[in-house]
Image (cartoon, grey):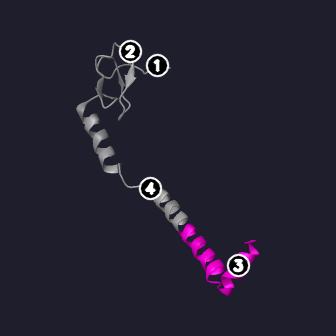
Amino acid sequence: MGAGICINHRNRDASERCHTCHKPLCAECVRKAGGNIFCSLACEENYAKFHRHYKSDRPSLLASLVKWALVLAVVGAAVLFIGGKVLKIGVLVEILKKFGF
């Protein structure tokens, strides 16, 4: 399936589509920027504005939750082991025995 007919040159087949609005473009009308193809400066700027707004250097919420779950698991295991094996706290000793430690 072709890209259609160029929006600017109705007598030319389109070879590409704008990355933002998806309008068909011939080779002469293609505007390349940042590895993408655009039909106009407006579409290029809209694309850049959108990605500046939504791009974040912060880790995702899921990544943060997984990290904190791992930290809590390690801390919990350390407390359980030290409390049961080293300090001989009765409740923790019983928990360790249930798990075969």
Q: Residue at x 43, y 21 (%)?
A: 3
Q: Which residue is mark 3?
A: 95
Q: Earlier in the sequence, mark 4 or mark 2?
A: 2
Is disc 2 in contact with disc 1, using a CB cutoff of under 8 Å? yes
Q: Which residue is mark 2?
A: 13
- Left or right: residue 39 versus residue 16 is left
Q: Which residue is mark 1?
A: 2
Q: Quadrant of residue 69?
A: bottom right
Q: Which residue is mark 4?
A: 60
- Left or right: residue 5 versus residue 31 is right
Task: Say above or below: 28 vs 88.
Answer: above
Residue 10, position as x, y percentages in the image: 33, 17
Q: Residue furthest top?
A: 11
Q: Quadrant of residue 81?
A: bottom right
Q: Earlier in the sequence, mark 3 or mark 1?
A: 1
| Residue nearest the viewer, comparing 19 with 67 | 67
What segment is highlighted magenta in the picture? 72-101
- The amino acid marked with disc number 1 is Gly
